[in-house]
């Protein structure tokens, strides 16, 4: 019985860490993965570098994006921060 009473605070601490830190990060990672998998040609996205680009071609691990009318660049899917929604 004494061992259980000594371990109980650690169990509560681990449970709190799971619900406050680990679980929200897992949800965020899952949502980002779903967003990246749903990208299609013509979507506007923001890269981790801060560029707003238009998806030109979707491949397995890469995206070809248009920086402007003449420039196509191939980037990894991991370098996408989020979708861009016009606010105007």
Image (tube, helix red, strand yellow):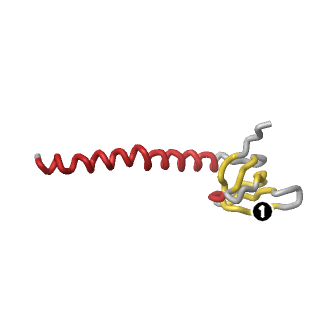
Q: Residue at x 63, y 49 (%)?
A: 37
Does residue 60 appear in this view?
no
- 65 or 18, nearer to the observer: 18
Up/down of 20 relative to 50, above or below = above
Q: Position of residue 81 (x, y in %)?
A: 65, 53
Q: Residue at x 54, y 50 (%)?
A: 29
Q: Residue at x 77, y 57 (%)?
A: 65
Does residue 8 appear in this view?
yes
Q: Position of residue 32 (x, y in %)?
A: 59, 48
Up/down of 77 relative to 16, above or below = below
| Residue pointed to by mark 1 | 73
Q: Residue at x 66, y 55 (%)?
A: 80
Q: Position of residue 39 (x, y in %)?
A: 69, 48
* Mark 1: few/some/many CA within 10 Å (<14, 14-19, 20+): few
Lateral position of residue 4 relative to residue 64, left or right: left
Residue furthest to the left in view is 1
Up/down of 60 relative to 18, above or below = below
- 9 or 36, nearer to the observer: 9
Q: Secondary structure at mark 1?
A: strand
Query: How many marks are shown on the rendered structure?
Result: 1
Which quadrant of the figure contains the C terminus?
A: top right
Lateral position of residue 18 relative to residue 52, left or right: left
Q: Position of residue 35 (x, y in %)?
A: 63, 46
- 7 or 62, nearer to the observer: 7
Residue furthest to the top in view is 88
């Amino acid at each position: 019985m004494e061992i259980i009473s000594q371990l109980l605070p650690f169990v509560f601490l681990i449970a709190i860490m799971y619900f406050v830190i680990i679980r929200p990060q897992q949800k965020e990672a899952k949502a980002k993965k779903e967003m990246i998998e749903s990208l299609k040609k013509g979507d506007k996205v923001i890269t981790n570098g801060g560029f707003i680009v238009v998806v030109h071609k979707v491949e397995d691990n890469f995206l070809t994006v248009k920086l402007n009318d003449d420039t196509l660049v191939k980037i990894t899917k991991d370098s996408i921060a989020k979708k861009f929604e016009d606010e105007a």
